[in-house]
Image: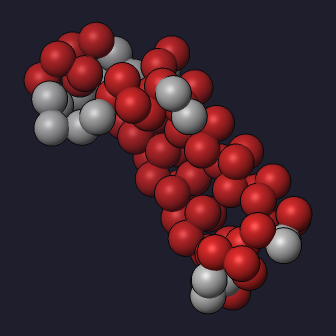
Amino acid sequence: MNDRDMKSIKWIVAHIENILDYMKSIHSLEDFAYNQLVIDAVVFNLAQIGEISKYRVSSYIKDTQVSVPWHEMYGF
């Protein structure tokens, strides 16, 4: 794995950790639906994951790590 891939994977993990952190105070779908700040934060981090997985992660990683749903991540 090259340095760029390593950094990209670390960024993806950091965005996932952000989402988990934002969701700690959410206990139901209703809580989520009425908290625009959390919605915006989660959507932003999902979008970042999609961008990183599409444009920063190498084809080599995508081709060798077939258990990761890369295409679905692009859709974020």
Q: Depth check: give the residue in front, 37 or 60.
A: 37
Query: Residue 56: x, y in percent?
Result: 48, 20
Q: Position of residue 72 (x, y in %)?
A: 39, 31
Up-down relation of residue 20 to residue 66 (above or below): below
Q: Is residue 15 above or below residue 17?
A: above
Determine whether, in the image, residue 76 is placed left or right of residue 37.
Answer: left
Residue 5 percent location from the top left of the image = 37, 28
Residue at image coords 33%, 28%: 70
State the quadrant of the N terminus: top left
Q: Does the rendering let one see residue 4?
A: no
Q: Quarter-wise, where is residue 41 in the image?
A: bottom right
Locate the C terminus and report the quarter of the image it occupies.
Answer: top right
Task: Say left or right for 74 vs 33.
Answer: left
Single out the residue that lies furthest toward the top.
59
Residue at horizontal 45%, vertical 53%? 13
- Could you say which is closer to the camera, residue 23 or residue 32? 32
- Which image quadrant is residue 69 in? top left
Q: Residue at x 68, y 56 (%)?
A: 42
In-front residue for pair 39/41: 39
* Residue 58 drawn at (x, y percent): 34, 16
Q: Is residue 42 above or below residue 45?
A: below
In the displayed orientation, state which residue is furthest to the front.
30
* In the displayed structure image, the side of residue 21 where residue 35 appears, left or right: right
* Residue depicted at x 44% and y 33%: 73
Q: How is the image coloured?
A: secondary structure
Give the answer, above or below, for where 71 lies relative to 24. above
Q: Is residue 73 visible?
A: yes
